[in-house]
Image (cartoon, rainbow, N blue to C red):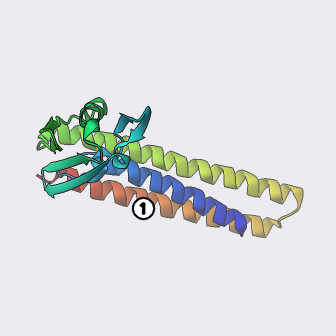
Amino acid sequence: MSLINEVKARMEESLEAMRREFATVRTGKATPALLDTVRVEAYGSSMPLNQVATINVPEGSLIVVQPFDKSLLQEVEKGILQADLGLNPSNDGSVIRVPIPALNEERRREMVKLLSKMAEEGRVSIRHARREANDRIKALVKEGELSDDDGRRQLDQVQALTDQFTGRIDDMMDAKEKEIMTV
């Protein structure tokens, strides 16, 4: 059964990666996860924003970024601009305010298309894990290490996992789409 557990773990990883990607998609509501992809040049290397600053959401349409080191204000602002998130940070000398603009209908539809693409990549990743598991099971049956019946049972279990995880991706996609399309 370790093969089934291995497949399940790979599918969980794919789902978690997709969940992280979904969190970076703007919904019109401020959330610290929007800035997860931001990298800042600090202390001679490129670092994630959350390692050089605190990120707060005081209200639904504003993110406040406060660098631990005030000398990094310009670099943090530059990092947010370079992340190409469509956000315009403003620096007041001690903190950086990032207003989250409301999404128009056209932009919402673009976001849904982007989500669909991300969801399909997640499904492909899960199907890839299924194909690898199926190939390994078939090889074990061919080598005689698994009986035909056990092989068939394991193939059925892998397919059931695949169906379960693609269903979870669809549920995540539907929830995020609803969140984006809500005005």
Residue 47 higher or lower than 183, as above or below = above
Left or right placement of residue 98 versus residue 174 in this view: left
Q: Quadrant of the N terminus?
A: bottom right
Q: Give coordinates of residue 86: x percent, y percent.
A: 21, 34
Q: How many marks?
A: 1
Left or right placement of residue 107 versus residue 176 in this view: left
Q: Is residue 55 visible?
A: yes
Which residue corresponds to the image point at 19% horizontal and 42% vertical from the top-left? Answer: 108
Q: Is residue 28 visible?
A: no
Q: Give coordinates of residue 93: x percent, y percent.
A: 14, 38
Residue 4 higher or lower than 121, as above or below = below
Which residue is at the front of the view, 75 or 146?
A: 75
Q: Which residue in the structure is indicated by mark 1?
A: 168
Seen as rendered, the residue at the extreme right is 144
Which residue is at the front of the view, 66 or 145?
A: 66
Which residue corresponds to the image point at 42% horizontal and 35% vertical from the top-left? Answer: 46
- Quadrant hosting residue 96: top left
